[in-house]
């Protein structure tokens, strides 16, 4: 758990085995988010090869204006998506705002000042099994709410 903000590029294996921390960094070397099981990571720059190998939980958001990330990601256990909901967009933006505030990052400043054009360049890295569990939990919660509403009638 906790938060960390790094101005600049991290080396290899950034956030390996992360199980709950939230992190923002301006690039990573090879094997980023390897074996990650939880938490949320925002990467505001390039990644090395084999990103997300063995990633089973958590979510990473990679800013990819050059459209190069897909070839650097290990797709065995993850899918690549876009930021889809307003809630998710706000969470990513809030992490980047904190990063800017705590580090004075020029990269974060530029992304935030151009948010509407930058947002479509974020790739959401979402482990298949983790996504399935989240969807099942949401469906179960919905069924409980429906049952409670029916019982109240």
Image (cartoon, helix red, strand yellow):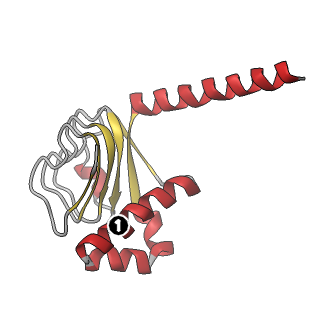
Residue 65 position, x and y percent, is 35, 68
Determine crowd level at label 1: few under 14, some 14-19, many 20+ residues with C-alpha closer than 10 A.
some
Quarter of the picture holding the N terminus: top left
Could you say whether the residue bearing mark 1 is in a helix, strand or loop? helix
Q: Residue at x 13, y 59 (%)?
A: 10
Q: Which residue is mark 1?
A: 98
Of 99 and 119, nearer the camera is 99
Residue 43 position, x and y percent, is 28, 59
Q: Is residue 143 above or below residue 96?
A: above
Q: Residue at x 38, y 69 (%)?
A: 97
Quarter of the picture holding the C terminus: top right
Of 20 and 116, nearer the camera is 20
Q: Quadrant of residue 107?
A: bottom left
Seen as rendered, the residue at the extreme left is 11
| Count of marks overlaid on the render | 1
Q: Is residue 111 above or below residue 19?
A: below
């Amino acid at each position: 758990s906790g938060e960390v903000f790094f101005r600049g590029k991290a080396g290899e294996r950034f956030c390996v085995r992360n199980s709950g921390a939230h992190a923002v960094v301006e690039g990573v070397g090879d094997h980023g988010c390897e074996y990650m099981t939880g938490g949320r990571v925002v990467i505001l720059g390039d990644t090395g090869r084999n990103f997300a190998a063995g990633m089973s939980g958590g979510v990473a958001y990679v800013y990819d204006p050059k459209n190069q990330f897909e070839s650097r990601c290990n797709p065995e256990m993850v899918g690549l998506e876009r930021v889809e909901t307003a809630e998710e967009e706000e969470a990513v933006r809030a992490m980047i705002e904190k990063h800017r505030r705590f580090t004075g990052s020029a990269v974060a400043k530029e992304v935030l000042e151009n948010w509407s054009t930058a947002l479509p360049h974020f790739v959401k890295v979402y482990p298949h099994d983790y996504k399935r569990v989240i969807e099942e939990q949401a469906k179960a919660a919905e069924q409980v709410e429906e049952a409670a509403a029916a019982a109240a009638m």
